[in-house]
Image (cartoon, rainbow, N blue to C red):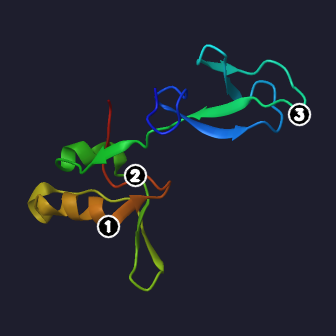
Amino acid sequence: MSDKIPGIPEGWELVRIGGGITANVDWLLSSRGLPVLCAVSDSVNQNYIIIRKIEKPAAYRPFANAEEFRPHRERWWYRDNKDGSRRHFPPASYSDKAHGGSVWQHRFETCFFDDGTPFGVKIDE
């Protein structure tokens, strides 16, 4: 059980109490304390406890070397400048000899791919 709101299962959070439900969109807390996907629309006068699953953000780490970067070398990437502007960079290839190991950590801390994902490898959990 959650330590924030009694009765809300671990990994879920309170959205609202009452206010109606939307079929196949809202999850509610059943009388047994389990998440249940709503199957019907209901009146706004009902005091259902509407909950949602807490999504953990994906975890990333810096590329280990140029070989690990290889599948991403055709992607555009960017860096936000101190003045708030954004500088875009075209796809590139890298060599560990030319850039050294520290470039991967530095780019991970300062750069993102064009879709907003970090300049690194997604960690599968």
Using the image, determine if residue 94 lies above or below residue 38: below
| Depth order, front residue of 92/36 | 36
**Is 5 placed left or right of 77 in the picture?**
right
Mark positioned earlier in the residue sequence (1 or 3): 3
Mark positioned earlier in the residue sequence (2 or 1): 2
Comparing labels 1 and 3, the label whose residue is closer to the camera: 3
Label 3 secondary element: loop
Compute the Cα span from label 3 to label 2.
54 Å
Compute the Cα span from label 1 to label 3.
50 Å
The kind of residue tagged 1 is: Thr
Q: Residue at x 20, y 50 (%)?
A: 66
Mark positioned earlier in the residue sequence (3 or 2): 3
Q: Residue at x 88, y 26 (%)?
A: 42
Residue under pointer 2: 74
Residue under pointer 1: 110
Label 1 secondary element: helix
Compute the Cα span from label 2 to label 1.
19 Å
Using the image, determine if residue 61 lies above or below residue 19: below
Q: Residue at x 40, y 42 (%)?
A: 58
Using the image, determine if residue 125 lies above or below residue 62: above
Q: Residue at x 32, y 29 (%)?
A: 125
| Depth order, front residue of 9/63 | 9
- In percent of width and height, residue 101 lies at 11, 58
| Depth order, front residue of 118/37 | 37
- In percent of width and height, residue 121 lies at 30, 44
Q: Residue furthest top?
A: 32
- In percent of width and height, residue 24 lies at 76, 24
The kind of residue tagged 2 is: Glu
The kind of residue tagged 3 is: Asn
Label 2 secondary element: loop
Q: Using a 10 Å C-alpha cutoff, classify the residue at mark 2 as few (fewer than 14 neighbours), some (14 to 19) or many (20 or more).
A: few
Instruction: Say the numbered circle drawn on residue 45.
Output: 3
